[in-house]
Image (cartoon, rainbow, N blue to C red):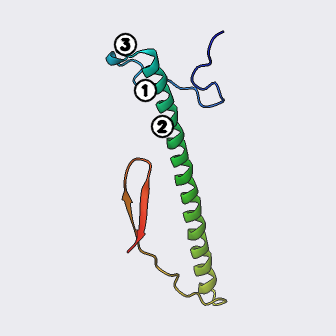
């Protein structure tokens, strides 16, 4: 019976990184399985990061629309808009996947 390959559980089917690397021919089966597992884990983290960045962008765009709407309404004289609070944050990248946000 043939064992299922990468992506057998519905995950994205893709070429493992380094597939054409010269060092790959010296890897044994255990190392190849571990490389495949690591490759899928890295891809899942990248997809999660893309989703998070997309969600952050949606929230930012929603906030910008609220600000513009409030300024339009305040320019008509119907609503007095106070300045929104200014939050100062610094973002420090710890690695490709984790980001630390702390208040200044």
**Res 103 → quadrant:** bottom left
Q: Position of residue 27 (x, y in %)?
A: 38, 16
Residue matched to label 2? 42
Q: Position of residue 18 (x, y in %)?
A: 39, 23
- Confirm or deny contact between disc 2 and disc 1 (CB under 8 A): yes
Q: Please report whichever mark, 2 or 1, sits nearer to the chain's N-terminal start.
A: 1
Residue 17, numbered label: 1
28 or 5: nearer the viewer = 28
Residue at image coords 37%, 17%: 24
Q: Please report whichever mark, 2 or 3, sits nearer to the chain's N-terminal start.
A: 3
Relative to 79, say whether 66 is above or below: above
Q: Position of residue 71 (x, y in %)?
A: 58, 80
Q: Label 1 neighbourhood size at 10 Å, few (<14), some (14-19), many (20+)? A: few
Residue 25, numbered label: 3
Q: Which of the image's four quarters has the C terminus?
A: bottom left
Number of numbered tags placed on the structure image: 3
Secondary structure of the residue carrying tag 2 is: helix
Q: Position of residue 29 (x, y in %)?
A: 46, 16
Q: Which of the image's four quarters has the N terminus?
A: top right
**Marks 2 and 3, how far apart at CA:** 22 Å
């Amino acid at each position: 019976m043939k064992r299922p390959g990468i992506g057998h559980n519905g995950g994205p089917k893709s070429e493992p990184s380094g597939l054409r690397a010269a060092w790959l021919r010296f890897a044994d089966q255990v190392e190849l399985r571990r490389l495949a597992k690591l490759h899928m884990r890295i891809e899942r983290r990248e997809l999660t990061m893309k989703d998070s960045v997309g969600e952050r962008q949606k929230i930012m765009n929603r906030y910008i629309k609220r600000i513009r709407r409030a300024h339009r309404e305040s320019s008509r004289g119907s609503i007095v808009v106070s300045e929104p609070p200014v939050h100062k944050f610094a973002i420090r990248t710890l690695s490709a996947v984790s980001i630390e946000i702390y208040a200044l």
